Amino acid sequence: MAAMRTSRAIVLLAAAAALGAGGGAAVVAIAGDDGGATATVTTTVAQPTSVQVANRTGTLSAGEVYAHAKDSVAFITAQVVERDASSPFWPPAERRGEATGTGFVVSDDGHVVTNAHVVDGATDVTVKIGDGEPVRAEVVGRDASTDVALLKVADADGLRPLRLADSDAVRVGDPVFAIGNPFGLDRTLTTGVVSALQRQITAPNGFKIDGVIQTDAPINPGNSGGPLLDAHGEVIGVNSQIINGSGASAAGNVGIGFAVPSNTVRNVIEQLERHGRVEHAYLGISMGDTPDADGVLVGAVAPGSPADEGGLREGDVIVAFDGRRTDTTAALAAAVNASRVGDRVELTVRRGGAERTLAVRLGRQPASARAAVERPPARPEGGAPGRSGRSIDPRDLLEELIP
């Protein structure tokens, strides 16, 4: 990711209207190396007529996928309030604005999935599903660690939920279809392929999202939270971020987009529906792959973290997690993500040419990566204070801190 930061910016895909501005136009800010450019588009788009697709066997054409899914795709508008943390006055000054994004229906009782960053700071959310009228929606819960949010609309009559596919079955080269509202242009279809798998992107709270699907299907600000569909019209991911270009291409899509995989989404929305929040297990290290891909190299260790309490040190190489090999950072992150808060696990580490086993009790992931650096995270009952007490430059951790 370091090479990307030198010339490009990763962009969250909610279209944010200028705070304090009136409604109507979709004003989209794209953050580039120089702070970004803005583009304003005002348009009215006629809605296509409804077409039913009866046969789900085999694969569908782009038009058939669109006809199958378009009436399940939502245009989301969030009224957002931002507080000026730098203000010397109390209470801090507030700025109000509007963010727009995309969502899609996942249950016939009115649940709608979108990105967490679309409704971050929202005081009021409206959802327009298919050709329906805009209706108010409740934010059931949002998970900044995976950038997934679950909404609920009261009037669910006639809704057609989209099915979440098994994202583990996706392969590079598979055809994909994105439907969303880029720059306010509602229910726009774009097509492409799965460009790569097992990518890693940074969540809005600074932690990493693993197993992400990369696609060249054009997605832009306003597509955020929309479905990435396979050739059966099933959702394999939720469109979340793009890498934009530099120079003349800074304001446009360059064919590199990322979608949170549907298996992650399924797990998150089940927890949001039950509890309104998601708890993520937490280890608390920065890490990197070894040159021979035979383990995970430990960089900085967050003070007071489970890794710190368990005796992990900078320079250790983690080769197994509860007896399962961890040859790569992706394998270790997946193992932590599959665990529960409070689980006691054994880490096999290589240190000074010898292997040893360390017992670690996983903690609860802090609200943000920065919070993990600034203060010890919440520990399950019975946790002990951190061992090292040493100071760490936050920049060593913010980009690479894992769950």
Image (spheres, rainbow, N blue to C red):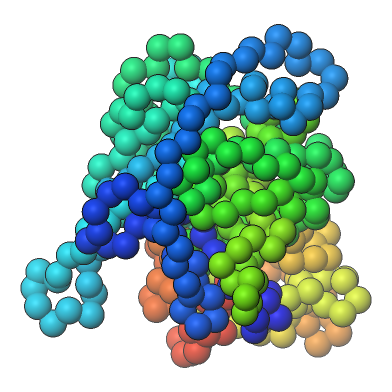
Q: How many marks?
A: 0
**Of the pair 163 and 375, the residue shown nearer to us:** 163
Left or right of 343 in this view: 24: left
**Of the pair 233 and 354, the residue shown nearer to us:** 233
**Of the pair 103 and 168, the residue shown nearer to us:** 103
Residue extending farthest to the right is 292
What residue is shown at x 48% (from left), y 51% (from top)? 183
Residue extending farthest to the top is 54
**Residue 212, image x, y percentages:** 69, 53
Could one spot residue 199 in this view of the protein?
A: yes
Quadrant where the N terminus sits is: bottom right
**Residue 43, image x, y percentages:** 43, 44
Left or right of 173 in this view: 152: left
Q: Is residue 84 above or below residue 165?
A: below
Could one spot residue 386 in this view of the protein?
A: no
What residue is shown at x 22% (from left), y 61% (from top)? 20
**Of the pair 237 and 359, the residue shown nearer to us:** 237
What residue is shown at x 85% (from left), y 20% (from top)? 58
**Residue 98, image x, y percentages:** 31, 52
Residue 244: quadrant of the picture: bottom right
**Residue 162, image x, y percentages:** 59, 25
Left or right of 18 in this view: 343: right
Quadrant where the C terminus sits is: bottom right
